[in-house]
Image (cartoon, grey):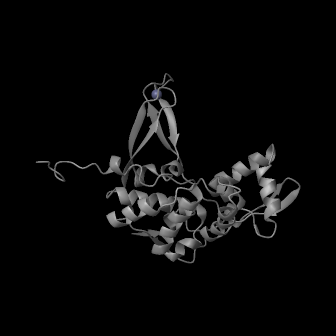
């Protein structure tokens, strides 16, 4: 399947290529995936990246904001042949499990991209000024390789945030310290950067009948990021088999 880069969360901003290709996994690939996929979240993420790159080497030049969407999309086309998908979430009030059928076309929306933010920025963190970049998959992999080796940071969100700083390798220790020990308005800054550069997908709204607000609903938002955490968790929900597939004697 060819995806136009203009349809990615970044809008394909300054990409020198116009499409990327991804395809659904077949049974052999899924079996291999389940057998070989690492447990460690960082290594698992790298494993997902490698799968995408094997299919299209250009993916290493995509922005990280597009990567998460591509991982999600590969999952979607693996479990669904019509680009619809059932998501489920537990209501925090009553514990009921809510399900919703979503479709790529009508339920997945990106926040509008602004060319100004895609040129990076200058930020002040602690007592240091830094230039930020919009990290590509390659940039992120470089930062991840450091943390996979030393296991010092295991949270992918923090590693992604570190990858926003230009020239990470030159002053890695200082950057790491300024991010990990950020306080007060520096925290707000880092959260804003995360939202600008990584969380480009609008959440999906689910409502529970238990709520007593004006409309009688409980609104919940499911982030697409949470859907890609476990690549095949939903495969059975989405591809149930019926009598046309199996008939016991
Ligand atoms: Zn509820």
The residue depicted at 64 percent of the width and 60 percent of the height is 114
Q: Is residue 143 left or right of residue 78?
A: right
**Closest to the observer: 217 or 28?**
28
Q: Which residue is most to the left?
A: 249
- Numbered circles on residues, count: 0
Q: Can see residue 9? A: no
Q: Is residue 174 left or right of residue 110?
A: right
**91 w.r.t. 139: above or below:** above
Q: Is residue 180 left or right of residue 72?
A: right
In the rendered image, which quarter contains the N terminus?
bottom left
Q: Is residue 103 left or right of residue 121?
A: left
**Closest to the observer: 176 or 5?**
176
Q: Can see residue 104? A: yes
**Closest to the observer: 130 or 47?**
47
**Closest to the observer: 76 or 38?**
38
**102 w.r.t. 75: above or below:** above
The residue depicted at 63 percent of the width and 55 percent of the height is 156
Q: Which residue is most to the top?
A: 212
- Percent coordinates x, y for residue 5 in the rendering: 51, 69
The residue depicted at 70 percent of the width and 54 percent of the height is 193
The residue depicted at 45 percent of the width and 24 percent of the height is 210
- Percent coordinates x, y for residue 155 in the rendering: 65, 53
- Percent coordinates x, y for residue 91 in the rendering: 48, 32
- Percent coordinates x, y for residue 3 in the rendering: 45, 68
């Amino acid at each position: 399947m060819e995806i136009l880069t203009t349809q990615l969360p970044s809008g394909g901003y300054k990409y020198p290529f116009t499409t990327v290709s991804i395809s659904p996994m077949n049974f052999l690939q899924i079996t291999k995936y389940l057998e070989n996929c690492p447990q460690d979240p960082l290594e698992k993420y790298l494993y997902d990246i490698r799968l995408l790159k094997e299919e299209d080497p250009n993916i290493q030049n995509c922005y990280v904001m597009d990567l998460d969407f591509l991982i999600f999309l590969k999952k979607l086309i693996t479990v669904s042949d019509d680009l619809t998908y059932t998501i489920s979430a537990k209501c925090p009030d009553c514990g009921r499990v809510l399900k919703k059928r979503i479709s790529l076309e009508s339920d997945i929306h990106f926040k509008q991209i602004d060319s100004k933010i895609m040129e990076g920025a200058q930020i002040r963190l602690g007592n240091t000024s830094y230039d930020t970049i919009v990290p590509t998959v390659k940039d992120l992999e470089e930062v991840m390789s450091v943390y996979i080796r030393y296991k010092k940071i295991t949270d992918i969100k923090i590693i992604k945030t570190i990858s926003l700083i230009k020239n990470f390798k030159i002053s890695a220790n200082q950057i790491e310290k300024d991010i990990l020990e950020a306080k007060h308005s520096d925290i707000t800054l880092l959260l804003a950067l995360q939202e600008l550069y990584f969380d480009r997908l609008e959440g999906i709204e689910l409502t529970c009948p238990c709520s007593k607000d004006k409309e009688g609903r409980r609104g919940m938002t499911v982030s697409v990021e949470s859907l890609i955490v476990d690549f095949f968790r939903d495969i059975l929900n989405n591809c149930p088999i019926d009598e046309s597939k199996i008939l016991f004697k």
